[in-house]
Image (tube, rainbow, N blue to C red):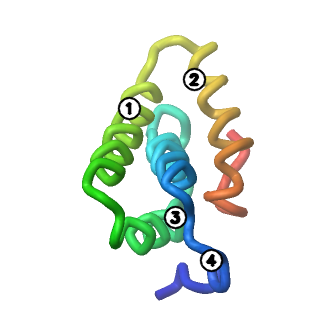
Amino acid sequence: MAAAPVFAGEPAWSDSEFLSANRCLGLAQSKDLGVVDATALIAKIKQEGRGRIGYVRDRADEMRSAALRDGRTRSETVRTKLAAERDGVCKAYLGATVAAN
């Protein structure tokens, strides 16, 4: 799998990190914010989702969906804030795939 080297040797994520990564994935996939390549993050989330309790996986899905929904806002101010989150905080999960918009 191509994503393996990006995360090789890293410890497993906490539930909080798993939830944050899913929010970041939603922001990365938002067409209105400018989609970035999240292939490695998708693979890592899939790997990290194994063995998690159902509530955490469900909450992660909700957070990803909410981020996608948030990205569809008409407010330029909110879009700018969300893009800054994706390009800042989420860079830890997205790595070098974050592109300047």
Residue at 55% x, 84% y: name it: 4
Q: Amino acid at mark 4?
A: Phe
Observer-nearest of 28 and 45: 45
Q: Which mark is residue 66?
A: 1
Task: Give the Cα separation between the discs numbered 3 and 4.
Answer: 9 Å
Q: Measured from the top left, where is residue 31 in percent x and y?
A: 44, 39
- Report the disc number at residue 79: 2
Q: Amino acid at mark 2?
A: Arg
Task: Decide: few, some or many residues near mark 3? Use Cα within 10 Å; few <14, some 14-19, many ≥20.
Answer: many
- How far is disc 4 from disc 1 in space, using C-alphas? 26 Å
Classify mark 4: helix, strand or loop: helix
Which image quadrant: the C terminus? top right
First reached walking from the N terminus: tag 3 or tag 2: 3
Residue 7's tag is 4
Three-letter amino acid code of the residue under disc 1: Ala
Report, in whole angstroms, how far the alpha carbon at label 1 lies from the one at label 2.
Answer: 14 Å
Q: Is residue 59 left or right of residue 22?
A: left
